[in-house]
Image (spheres, rainbow, N blue to C red):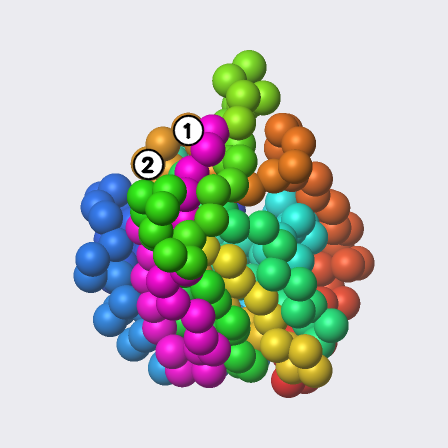
Amino acid sequence: MWTIPNTQLQPLYNAVGLDRHTRNDAWKAPLRAFAETLPLRRIVQHVLRDQDLLTTVAAVALRHPMGFDKLILLRDACGALIKIDVWWEEDDDWGTIHNHRFDFASTVLHGELRTRLFVDAAPATTGARTVDVYRLTVPQNPKDAVPQQRTLLPAWEGALPAGTTYDMRCEMFHMASGTRGRTTVTLVAQGAPRRTYSLATRDTPGLLPVTPMSVADVRERLERLEAL
């Protein structure tokens, strides 16, 4: 059942119902309740003290092309997972407008997450802009090289401080960024993929580049989080 087992986070997996492949309408409350009872320090200490878990987490840890560290702490065989995303003090790049293959819910454990949301609009809508959007398919598909034109209208922009919990459907176009000078950490409950692709504004087609991490990299980052 598990590709990354984590007994500490399995109660959250069960409470959210990630095994049922439902949409994320009711995920925020159990995620918020769990985060209120389990501090970030205890989450990272659990991984640091279990060498097998640390090695497993490091095998899939990466520096995400959207400008944050992605640390998957639990994942089932269908792809549902629980992770922490980290924007360090210098991570204030917005990346590109994108959506996802999956629904998720997230709670800000530390710092402040900046977010922009976009909705589809008619081309003549005031404030909207027409952009080239590429599919990012897993596994890759020849259609990924063909851009689609979408007209997107900014719908909301704001900063989500620590303690904020939110959710997002796979179809929602958005951007996210950390806040300069602050470490921002989110705990994310992510459902199994609902489709094979995401969409992102790009100048060129192809999957976005990622930077893998070593066990030493992950240990160093977790120790930094433990000290927050």
Q: Is residue 202 above or below residue 83?
A: above
- Dividing the picture into quadrants, the one containing residue 158 is bottom left
Disc 2 marks a residue whose amino acid type is Arg
Q: Taking the image as drawn, is residue 129 in sight? A: yes
| Nearest to the observer: residue 190 or residue 119 | 119
- Give the label on residue 196, or none: 1
Per the image, the residue denoted by label 2 is 194
Q: CA distance from mark 2 to mark 1?
A: 7 Å
Q: Which residues are magenta?
A: 148-173
Q: Main secondary structure of the magenta part?
A: strand
Point out residue 140 in the picture as x, y percentages from the top left corner: 56, 22
Tell me which residue sits at (73%, 72%) in the image: 90
Q: Is residue 95 above or below residue 185?
A: above
Q: Is residue 26 left or right of residue 73?
A: left
The quadrant of the rendering that contains the N terminus is top left
| Nearest to the observer: residue 138 or residue 159 | 159
Point out residue 9 in the picture as x, y percentages from the top left corner: 41, 62
Q: Is residue 4 above or below residue 78?
A: below
Q: Is residue 54 above or below residue 92?
A: above
Tell me which residue sits at (34%, 68%) in the image: 166
Is residue 167 within the magenta segment? yes
